[in-house]
Image (spheres, helix red, strand yellow):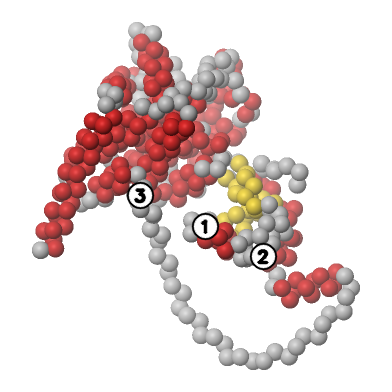
Amino acid sequence: MSSISQSVEDYIKIDFEQLMINKEITFSLYIVFIMNNHVILFKKNGSILDESFFKKYGKKKLIHLWIHHSENEAFKKYLLPEEEENKEEAVSKNEPLKEPQEATLEPEPEIAEPSIPEPEEPPPPEIPEAAITIEVLNSEEVPEEEKKEVTSELAKSVLNKIMNEDQGENEKEQRKYAKQFVKEILENISSDMNHIIKEIWEMGETDPELEHAINTSTYGVIFALAFGKIEKETITNIATAGLLHDIGVVKMNLDLFEPSMKDSDLQTKNKITQHVTHTLEILKNSPIKIDSALETMILQHHEKFDGTGYPNQIQGFQLDDLAQLVNMANLMDEICSGYYDGTPKTIEETFSIIDEMEKDRSFPENFNPEIFSEVRRWTKNMANEEEIESAAIMVGKQAQDIINKDLEEKAS
């Protein structure tokens, strides 16, 4: 194939377990992201899958890969035992077949009872703020209000890191830190949606087209935690809304998204608004179960406080508070990435632009002023990074003391 087809119907799903160690593949392997109608070349025809390949991807539970339908026969031949493969080659070359040697009968081996594999434990967190957050959220000893206080301080500490970023490599590292913080929390909270989150997140590590989805998910979760929203279902819903909010664009002409949002004409903007309803149509016709809270977050992620948003022109305090956090995260990344006006910005510059948007009008344009002013209060008070971090660590230590004390009492 001269180019990679992006039509998912052209691909056939195969099991990872069908692949063989140290055997050359006579077909290419792909990863197909069905919901986003996107295909990535994973391994080229002629590659040899060595032991390190199976250790790396088998451990990550890479259950399925895909092959192009035009290479299905090559795949079937690859699966043949070596003797059968040689036999098939001999027939195709009109060579005489070797007489089979008489087989010696051996006793059938005893078949062990199949064991049910234990669910894979997530790796230990690398981010200190994530480690404390996870321990506190999963603790039965820490009171609810203290859980909210701890997670809020820790989330603000991470937000502080990306607020104080500089352009360049440091900026990338700080944003990577924030993503890892959220990823580790999501890996360690129980939810039916986690497999979807994990799949998209891992795809996003190699596919730049998914970067906006992961950034929106990251900022949305950090905002929610900073507001003390610690219910696992809520955290998962916000993460999922961030990841899936734009999948409806696959039903649209992608040329519509080429100019910056600010420079798009009214007709283009009107067409772009359709992606919200397309997203919900795709999700409702998919195996993914979405509850009303998740649906609201996706439906309202472009609604504005002044009623000029879309698709339903909802205004004022009728807007859902959690949907507002997803909306804020979405707009933040659009401005940061340069999609808004063609020029990438830091987080601090992004908030300054949103500030100006809200100040230029007698009535707030985008966000509930109570929510936005609270976020701005956090970000404006983050000049002293050491103070923020020490406060987060102190609060986390208090929670850890409660956990340790309870464990000691149980041991005695």
Residue found at x 42% / y 69%: 116
Label 3 close to label 1 by CB (< 8 Å): no
Please report whichever mark, 2 or 1, sits nearer to the chain's N-terminal start. 2
Which residue is the site of mark 3? 125
Distance of label 3 from label 1 (alpha carbons)? 19 Å
Mark 1 crowdedness (10 Å alpha carbons): few <14, some 14-19, many ≥20: few
Residue found at x 39% / y 54%: 123
Q: Is residue 198 above or below residue 171?
A: below
Q: Which mark is residue 23?
A: 2
Q: Which mark is residue 56?
A: 1
Quarter in which the C terminus is drawn: bottom left
Q: Please name whichever residue, 311 or 354, is drawn nearer the observer in this view of the structure.
A: 354
Can the viewer see residue 3?
yes
Q: Is residue 122 above or below residue 23?
A: above
Distance of label 3 from label 2 (alpha carbons)? 35 Å
Residue 371 position, x and y percent, is 30, 24
Mark 1 falls on what kind of element?
A: helix
Mark 2 falls on what kind of element?
A: loop
Please report whichever mark, 3 or 1, sits nearer to the chain's N-terminal start. 1
Q: Quadrant of residue 385?
A: top left
Q: Is residue 325 above or below residue 194?
A: above
Q: Amino acid at mark 3?
A: Pro
Distance of label 2 from label 1 (alpha carbons)? 17 Å
Please report whichever mark, 3 or 2, sits nearer to the chain's N-terminal start. 2
